[in-house]
Image (cartoon, helix red, strand yellow):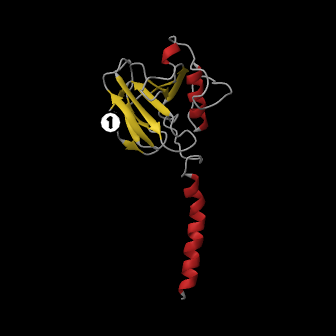
Amino acid sequence: MPKRPLIVTLALVGALLLPAAAANAGSGSRNVYVNPFPAEKFWAGRIDMGVDYGVSRRQPVLAMGKARILGSTAHSGWPGGRYLYYQLENGNHAGEIVYVAESLRDLKPAGAEVMAGERIAVAIPGGTGIETGYAELDGQTRAAPCYKEGRKTNSGREFARLLLHIGAEVGDDPGPGSSHPVGPRC
């Protein structure tokens, strides 16, 4: 059998695979994020500074995209003491910073590189559940300067829209608007 058909076949296979690979590469592409809170494992709570979730048994918390862990501590001022924040490195939210806090264990350390869908912590049942949302480069939640306990914030709504876009459920309707942290904080 001549080599040419094999080369053509491999070229065709490569051409068929290339669109899938291209869809998952680059800073403006689609499909680079995964739902970190699947409904069969997490139940959605309210929108406040971010979005709240609960679990009935230990569940892995996943990085929503390729990211670098910027900070990780078991001694924060949050209920449960755990707080982790990471910066997304690809997709149309590259550069944005996400926090996960409260009833967590086994947090990835600061400096770790993670891929979309990789475990960054473990959510544990009880306590206050977990909260996730947008953070600043220093780790402070985006809405912290203006947050009043129990109130929905614009930052929480923006993050809820991102979660909805990648297939997560949220407990409240965030309404229309951007999924980027660009509007008012509260």
Give whichever of 108, 103 is nearer the camera.
108
Q: Position of residue 69 (x, y in %)?
A: 39, 37
Residue positioned most to the bottom: 1
Q: Position of residue 170 (x, y in %)?
A: 57, 27
Residue, x 57% and y 39% (percent of image)? 166
Q: Position of residue 137 (x, y in %)?
A: 45, 29
Residue positioned most to the top: 148
Asked which quadrant contains residue 82, the reply is top left
Residue, x 38% and y 43% (percent of image)? 113
The N terminus - image quarter: bottom right
Task: Judge whether residue 58 can be spotted in this image.
Answer: no
Q: Amino acid at mark 1?
A: Pro
Please tell me how many numbered marks the rendered image carries: 1
Asked which quadrant contains residue 47, the reply is top right
| Vertical order, 96 against 125 (above or below) | below
Q: Say what secondary structure mark 1 lies in.
A: loop
The C terminus - image quarter: top right
Task: Judge whether residue 125 can be spotted in this image.
Answer: yes
Q: Which residue is mark 1?
A: 109
Residue, x 32% and y 36% (percent of image)? 109
Residue, x 55% and y 38% (percent of image)? 93
| Vertical order, 115 against 154 (above or below) | below
Residue positioned most to the front: 137
| Circle 1 residues within 10 Å: few <14, some 14–19, many ≥20 | some
| Vertical order, 22 against 55 (above or below) | below
